[in-house]
Image (cartoon, rainbow, N blue to C red):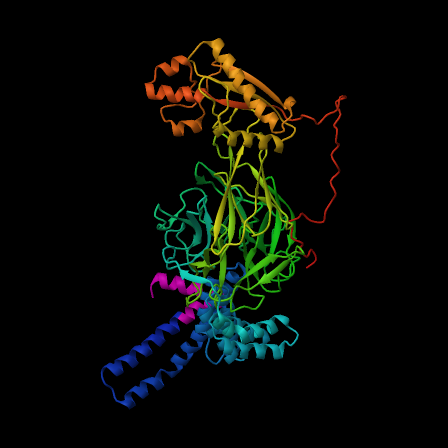
Amino acid sequence: MSMYSSAVLASQLWNCERVWRTHCFITQTIRTTKAIKSIVSALYHNMNHLSLLHILRSQRKDILLAATITVMLTACGVDRNIKKGEKYLALGEYYDAATQFKTAYQRTPPKDRHQRGELSLKLADCYSRISSFQRAIAAYRNAIRYKEDNGETHRKLAENLMKNGSYTEAVKEYRIALDSLPDEQTIARGMQAASTAAAAKAHGSKYIVKRMDVFNSRRQDYSPMLYGDKYEQLYFTSTRNEAKGDEPSGITGVKAGDIFLSEKDEKGKWGTPKVIVSGLNTEADEGTPAFSADGREMYITQCLTDPSYPRYAQIAVSNRSDAAWGKATKLEISRDTLSSFAHPAVSPDGNWLYFTSDMPGGKGGLDIWRVRLTGGTTGGVENLGDPVNTPGDEEFPTFRPNGDLYFSSNGHGGLGGLDIYIAKAGSDHRYHLEHPGYPLNSQGDDFGMTFEGLHNRGFFSSNRGDGRGWDHIYSFELPEVIQTVKGWVYEMDGYELPAAQVFMVGDDGTNRKLAVKGDGSFEQEIQPGVSYVLLATCNGFLNHKEEIKVSPVEASKEHTLQFPLAGLHVPVLIDNIFYDFDKATLRPESEKALNELVKLLEENPNVTIELSAHTDYIGSAEYNKRLSQRRADAVVAYLTSHGIVRDRLTPVGYGKERPKKIRRKLTEKYPWLKENDILTEDFIKKLDKEKQEIANQLNRRTEFTVLRTTYGMFDEKGNLKQQPKPKTKKNSDDNEIIIDLNP
């Protein structure tokens, strides 16, 4: 026996026998080996039966002794495997735990039915946790065969049979479980679900579901999330070979998850997913991305690796800078260090972060909670309570832009595994649940929704039809007729205003704050026959209001509204103001722009403005100044004739004294101009004739500048005419969901 073998053997025996017994075993093994060699030699040389029997008799004692020692060593090996399995199980490394329990099971003699049954139960629970439901079914049945079962065993077997679509068998197992645990409501609910699942599946729904293999690999691919102003990017979690790290996860047996990205090309075709090249992905497990309302922050689930400490999931946040996502940092949700926090989702208004946790105070299992987001921090953790949470598991919350909450649960019945449910807010400000049916839901785990804007289409994940329990990404669509309003909030010169806010009020009681994207746009579903008022606001700008009311249509329709905001600190161009040549007479085509200015002043009654007119450099300075003054007076006269108080208007004619200064947006239209160019006479004369004319047109302009924002607010003594009324406290905001704080 080599030195290496001796060392290995000594190591194996260390916890079972004293060192002095090692020598005895080695000696006996040598003798036993000789006996086996004699037997093999006899067979090789075609010895007769009597000769072989003689050898067997002579070596019987040695063989029996060796067999006894082997049994002892096997028992020691079994104990070692069990201890390792228990250690991995305590750390949440279910795959590694299952490997050890399986080895222990194989080493356990068939006669030791008790231990085989116990190991089968441990194996089954591990397989069940990693969604290897077919292996779990076999292991639970083994435990039952070895009579190590109870009501809970049959319940868990039934749950895995549901995942396999074996509804009839699941009913039988639920019935056995209910006989043992007659007061267990979850079992009764499960049996009811198993009894009706086949019929519900056959009934189906109008959802169209397709497997999206352009995103999928031979490993786990799940929790997709659309991103971008045009939803042209798809982030998701994957354990494919390209993920970071070399060692397989002890939890799943595959690599730790990383976040991958697929992008649409100009033709609308999705590209091959690529791992994100930034500090976002690490050797740890990252997944389930979600984005803030403005798209500048990504919230993820992170599971750090510590070989000596249980795996607790945490939520981390990454900031976007220079078109790249930075390293994620832990988001402090609670001081609880013994609970997991996972599956983040941001409410459409950006005020709440919803998540999954097993922290104390819930309904049992995993619950959905929420915490208020305030200036990059959190405060006020709340459990959603009834009817969302159950004693089972509720996970993977996400929102449709219309405010509907989608989540997955195994505690509400369903078709098997995790089913997707929709929580809609009713007129009572409470959630009411809907089950969208098959094929959005299946016998497997269905979870992780993402929506393409306001439409009921997008992507989700499911392990349906995969015997190994691998998750894959699917598309979904529910054909429907909806009407939406898409608005654009921008500075009057054309610059986007992502920092703006839009408030929408309807005569049906609607009262919402709408999130504005990075390109200054927003989307919102609207109902036929309802009159809506939408108000756009932004610091440093005047407000702008639009109204809309639509009639019923037979096909989905998008309505567009523009919200140009006037800046408080820069001159604002009044576009499309036209005068007769060399005169101050306003042309009829100017009325549209002038009426928009009237509307703006009516919406902002406390604003006073300077109304200024400008000319090009052609002609004398004195003449141009007189002409521009008459033109400014003409505009003021129009405004006052339409109800604007004269005291709010100051007409000024600058002639050619203030040539236009070029802002960046204008360079997009005229690339030969640069930002901060000033269109002086000298500058213009260096241009060719065509460009000279364009520059002169830019100088011939009518603008307004905000002077005050407090007009009419104070009396002669300098006191406010109308003191602000104290705000009355409400139990909840108009859009706030009332939740059960005592689940």
Out of 707 and 239, give the one closest to the viewer.
707
Which region of the structure is painted magenta? Answer: 1-25
Which residue sits furthest right? 717
Residue in the image at 41% along x and 71% along y: 25
Out of 305 and 15, give the one closest to the viewer.
305
The image shows a total of numbered marks equal to: 0
- Residue 203 shows in the view: yes
State whether the magenta stretch is mostly helix, strand or loop. Answer: helix
Q: Is residue 281 above or below residue 26?
A: above
Residue in the image at 62% along x and 63% along y: 390
Indicate the quadrant containing the N terminus: top left, top right, bottom left or bottom right: bottom left
In the figure, residue 700 lies in which quadrant? Answer: top left
Tell whether position 3 is magenta: yes
Which residue sits furthest left? 45
Tell whether position 591 is magenta: no
Name the spot of residue 732 as percent of width and height, x first: 69, 49
Out of 294 and 526, give the one closest to the viewer.
526
Out of 449 and 699, give the one closest to the viewer.
699
